[in-house]
Amino acid sequence: SACEAMEAEPPRIPTIFYGFSDMNALQRRLVLAACRGADAAALVPADRDAPACRFALPLIAWFETNGFVPQDLPAGESPRPAEKRPLEALCGCLFTPNRLPSPIGASLRIVSAPSESREAYEISRELLYEVPQAETDPQDTGPPAGEKAGVLLPGGDPYPGLFRDVFRSLGVPAREEDAGHRAATRPGRLFLLMLGLKARGHPRRELIRFLDEGRFCASPVFVEGIAPDGDHAALPARWEYITRRLPFLSGADEWREALRSPKFRGRLKEDDSRSADLLEQSLERLFGFLDGLPERALPSAHSAAALEAFDALTAVSENLEMDFGVIRKLGGLDKILGEIGAGEFHRWARTALEKARVPAAREPARVRMLSLQQARGLSFETVAIPGMAEGVFPARGAEDPLLPDTVRALLNDMLSAEGEMAPLPLKSGRAAEEQFLFWTALQAAERRVILGYPRGGKGAGDEAERPPSLFLEYIADASGLEGEGAEAKLRRLPGHRAASTALEPDVIQDRPLSLLEHDLGRLLGQIGKRSAKGALSDFTDRKPGFGRRVAAWRKRWANRLTPFDGALGEPDLIERIRERLDPESAHISVTALERFFTCPYQFALKHLLGLGEEKESGLALEAESDARGRFYHSALQRFAERVKKTGKGFGALAPGERRSLIGEAVREAGQIFETEDRPPLPVPWGILQRAAERDLNLFFEKTYREEPGWAPVEIEGWIGGKRTPRFALTEDGKKIQLIGRFDLVERNGEEHRFIDYKSGRTALPKTTVPGLGSGTRLQPDLYFHCAADRFGEGSRVSAAYAFPTERGEYRLAEIPPEAIEARREEVSALLGFYARAVDRGQFFPTPFQSFLGGTCGYCEFTSVCGPDRKGRADRKAGSDLRAELDDLRERTK
């Protein structure tokens, strides 16, 4: 359109074309149109004689062909004096066999580093220790003053983010050419998130994030229609917490059903119930707006409806027109696209927001970050160029598979015969363009240039070497230094520095970049020196915070148990622990006791502090192990109830009758599981149900074949509690009040047997009676001691672990009453240790596998203990209470 307007009415004022090194066909057409009515001039920043400027020669020739008179700028009229062009000689010798007439000197610094992140840090060190702090004039409305240094970035990730983070962490004002695209801004991200919510089924995490980050509680919809009074800024965080236990939800109807379900409401406290009510009302309004978005319409209708909904549901955009002007402009596609679907509009909106750039704030800055292309025509006192490694700059070029260079060359010959059309760029010519970019970047420096390259990839060490850039090889060749390979030549340059992977004492002492480096530099300077108070004492006196950290570290790694290890010795804390866990007044479950002997620290975190992991709901490709166990237990319970009604024993059922009862039990358990738990996707869920039927059939067929008389008597029974307290005795006669639930009691004549079902693999011995597992298998013994009297005198009571799955080998590991009586003292000793631990407040971690089940592999608190937990535990193995527990575990395993 601009070309047509200029061709119809050429401008009557002179035109200047500045900074171009190449032009496409439309740009050349615009130049010709602008030159028809008035004089014109073009400044091409290139030196005809410099080999690096070959890329710009075709454009210069085109200007000459179309009537522009060539005129080279005389050397004496250079806008910058010779002292402001320190690398002039180097630029003239690049990309040729020529060598520099004189050494480069201090005007060029080359820094190599182990990785990109370290490279950014070391370049910043070189940059900031040579650039004086700028003085800025707050009244200046022109370009920001003080931008003495320019960081010219060679391409995309990771360098923009790395330098941004480094400068921010160092507190250095740095200005980028733009602040990124609008799709990465908060309003842009939330707008695209809103458009995708309905199509993705309103997933919980994204839905709550939209309400939270979009400040829904400050939006017109919430303030005017839901809760006009009060400050509700923290409400989305509460919504996120109370919805964690919801199953995976897909669609508005499932959200409504889940929020109204008695199971969800029954777990909520009074305050949370109010929050749930507000969430339900908020989602109804949100779903209403999302349902109001058109499924198919013109782009203009999509834009208007989406922006209206976003404005009503959020409070993040201060200027809707500025943030989403490009979305309204999509209405210009009405005649081209016609009616489009919601998904296609979402893609167009994303493209538009990603193309729209956010202008950077015009604030005074010490360093300016911009791309190599954006730096053409600019100058800085110091120029830094990172990424001078093979494959980064220059980048690896690849031909277009749809339009290779051979086809491009033929098209250029056919369509550009008269010079009216710019030739299609050849991918093989990209090297010439990048040589020209490198030349212009070096020319932009008035005082010195810093070039950096990573020797390895991101996070790699010295062993993952990456060759330096081909451009650095040209510099090495031009320097005239001898050596084997570019790396060896570069290391011989006076301005080269190779940053080590290890700490560099000289560097951080002379040029620290942070307070931490300054402190470390002082520490390293003190090492080896003597003083009246000892080495480093002056430093710790001046830095009390550092001294406290060192003291805490030493205490944590001491050879004795400390509060860091769960040894809680404060009197008021001990008193609170006794109130919470007093063995005689507060009952404890048998399962919790087993957890204590697995790891006392895990027990304290779970049962004393009430900590635990809430897993995020998502699409379940298979049932988790705990959910699988609940399903099997539910099916076994319902099968036992049906067998009890028949009055027969498990082994007395006919095969067909047994299969029928098991099928009914599994189906009923599956229906309950689908309502109250989180079933996997349909296919794996069906496989799991069929596997349960097969496993239960095989288990009861194998284990009850020899003794068919065992019949269910009591299913899912309880012992202990406040109504019928049951006590177990410690070795010194102290009572421990217990509560527990057993899976099954079965009877065969005058003999009764407690059954504890296990749905996982078995590690129990096949030929001997299962032991106490160092305290991790207490249920059969404690149930025997506390509930055997309910069956009357003369009844023989035993116990057994049942493994009704293929992974458990369909085993029934029986524990006869004689074995239970024989180890009564061992059980009492374990209970006595628990009582003493509660009395002393000792809940130390045991992260080692010295007993069966003593592993951290399935613990949800490994992040609390840290990766060095085993090393710390080994240092404290000699502590009295630890030694006592280790000895007790050895006796009772």
Image (cartoon, grey):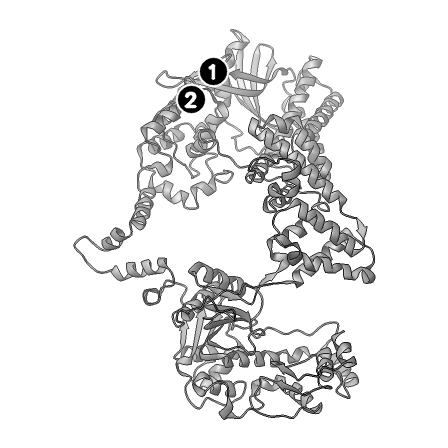
254 or 754: nearer the eye? 254
CB under 8 Å between discs 1 and 2: yes
Please tell me which residue is depicted at 54% across the width and 80% down the height of the picture. 440
Query: Which numbered circle lies on residue 183?
Result: none
**Tag 2: Cα neighbours inside 10 Å, few (<14), some, or many (≥20)?**
many
For label 2, the residue is 827
Query: Which numbered circle lies on residue 785?
Result: 1
Specify whether 364 is left or right of 227.
left
Badge 2 marks a residue whose secondary structure is helix
| Residue 628 in view, yes or no | no
Specify whether 728 is left or right of 205.
left
| Residue 645 position in % (x across, y down) | 70, 14
Which quadrant holds residue 429? bottom right
Q: Residue furthest left?
A: 532
Tell me if residue 692 comes above or below residue 52 in the rendering. Answer: above
Dot 1 amino acid type: His
Tell me if residue 526 comes above or below residue 848 in the rendering. Answer: below
464 or 90: nearer the eye? 90
Q: Residue furthest top?
A: 793
100 or 378: nearer the eye? 378
| Residue 22 in view, yes or no | yes
Specify whether 611 is left or right of 359.
left
Quadrant in which the C terminus is drawn: top left
Specify whether 253 is left or right of 742.
right
Which quadrant holds residue 43? bottom right
| Residue 726 position in % (x across, y down) | 47, 14
| Residue 4 position in % (x across, y down) | 78, 77
- Distance from the alpha carbon under mark 1 to that under mark 2: 10 Å
